Amino acid sequence: MEQRIPTDDIYMAAYLNYRGHQPELELNRSGKNVTFIFPASMNILNAMGDYGANPDVPLHEFVNSLKTVRAKMLSKRNEYSGGDYGQR
């Protein structure tokens, strides 16, 4: 089985997404919490280390990545609930 790296940190997931790593999303049994899953690789581990070092990132690109990851998270929650979770 492939090694995987889970994180509940949406900001880390957004940074990894910004760096070109697409997460898989898993919903917990209650349907409320989403975990972002990345394949275990040196590229991911290096990017996680970079994130921890507080790198300079173009704000607009990071915000777009955060919006993308958040939209996927809300979509995953909607799949579970079948409702309008997070919609305005």
Image: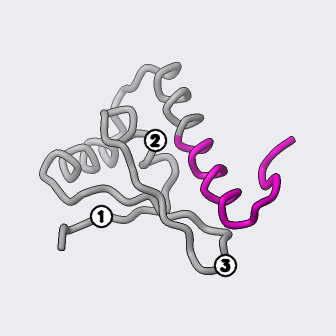
Real-space Cα distance between discs 2 and 1?
A: 15 Å
Q: Quadrant of residue 50?
A: top left
Q: How is the image coloured?
A: one colour
81 relative position to 37: left or right: right
Q: Residue at x 25, y 43 (%)?
A: 47
First-in-chain label (3 vs 2): 2
Q: Is residue 16 magenta?
A: no
Main SS category, magenta section: helix
To which residue does mark 1 refer?
5
Q: Position of residue 3 (x, y in %)?
A: 20, 68
Q: Amino acid at mark 3?
A: Ser
Depicted 34 relative to depicted 1: above or below: above
CA gap between label 1 and label 3 equals 21 Å
Q: Percent x, y for residue 13?
A: 43, 48
Q: Helix, strand or loop at disc 2?
A: helix
Q: Splitting the image into 4 quarters, where does residue 19 fall?
A: top left
Numbered disc total: 3
Which range of residues does the magenta coloring cover? Answer: 69-88
Q: Which residue position holds label 2?
A: 14
